[in-house]
Amino acid sequence: MTQGDPPRDWLTQGLDNRIPVIHQKGAGSGKGYTSKREALSGLRKLQRYIGYAMLLSAAAGVYLLATDGSLWILAVSHAVGLVLIVVLDVFLGLVNLMGSKRLYLASLAAAFLGIVLQLGDIVTAPQYNMTIPYFAAYLFKLPAFDILLALQAAVIVLGLSGRSDVEFLASRRRVSKELNYSRRSFAKTVVGFGALVGLGVILGSMKIPSATSSSSPSSNAPVASASNPITNTNNMQVDSPVYFQFPSGYPNVLFKRSDGTLEAYSLLCTHVCCECTYISSSKIYYCPCHGSEFDAQGRVIAGPANYPLPSIALNVDTSGNVFPTGVNGYSPC
């Protein structure tokens, strides 16, 4: 390599022996050897497609944020991460439509990161009391989630389809600096965007104390077990809820009925494991994430949940102490 030649890296290696052919008029059509004008034209066309795909991906993300209440109630950090992905998609989509070559590689890096983050959310299912297979099945049943992933993947496919044109332009001295097309640049961009999204997720996960904020009744409820009672029947009032955790982190509620019988139910909705609220005035359980409703016996009266709330098996000793001994019924949690 002589002084003044463009740098050779993983993307431009081997181009030197092509250059004499590249200068031939009419050689190639964007799939092999081509002229600078044809390569620039191909890149502009490619960027238009990438721009549209990123804007549509952002629209799918906005729809998901607007319609899936579990994001804001159950997983605020995921919602914040998705907001930042949407903002990046809008910005990079518009920049690509304007034809800026400088952020071409950044667009591919953002699409790659978007796919990694969205699929990575699946492994956090246990944090929200869900199994990974169930959470994965739930996410892939959301059309907006599938469309978002498909459009992010389309951006990467489009970028790869125009590789020959971009490689050629990356070998031209005046264009290569603007394109900045190299493995190192791609990795740096992914890390930079990842740090930005990670910072947003951390900030979104922080709980800011507020005088008006209130936690759910079960958040400070005692943890019960087969050896640690929920309460004593002598301390219970008819149809007055007694909240407890069984096991730790899983909210439940216990009732004493007018005939003296005891009933206990899990408060985790059988749709996506959001915590239900018991509404005493109407004697129903309401899920704030997607609007499912259950009657006083935990039976579904409004979807999207399809299964009743699991009941908690109880044991009462001779002193009236109430112990949970198991869970009956289906739950994805």
Image (cartoon, grey):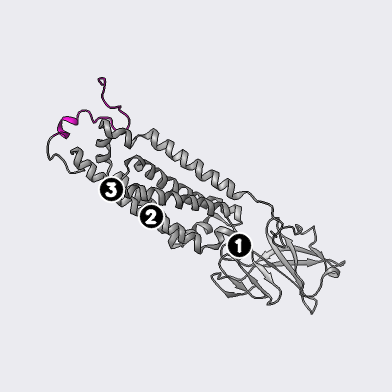
Position of 319 with respect to 262 (left or right) is right
The residue under label 3 is: 46
Crowdedness near tag 2: few (<14), some (14–19) or many (≥20) residues, C-alpha within 10 Å: many
Amino acid on which disc 3 is placed: Leu
Q: Secondary structure at mark 2?
A: helix
Residue at mark 3 to residue at mark 1: CA–CA distance: 42 Å
The residue under label 1 is: 274
Q: Is residue 9 visible?
A: yes
Q: Is residue 18 magenta?
A: yes
Rendered position, 61 above or below 288: above
Position of 210 with respect to 151 (left or right) is right
Asked whether 198 or 302 is in front, the reply is 198
In the rendered image, which quarter contains the C terminus?
bottom right
Which stretch did the figure color magenta?
Answer: 1-23
Residue at mark 2 to residue at mark 1: CA–CA distance: 31 Å
In the rendered image, which quarter contains the N terminus?
top left
Amino acid on which disc 1 is placed: Cys
Residue at image position (40%, 55%) is: 57
First in residue order: circle 3 vs circle 1: 3
First in residue order: circle 3 vs circle 2: 3
The residue under label 2 is: 55
Instruction: Answer whether labels 3 and 1 touch (C-beta < 8 Å).
Output: no
Q: Is residue 140 visible?
A: no
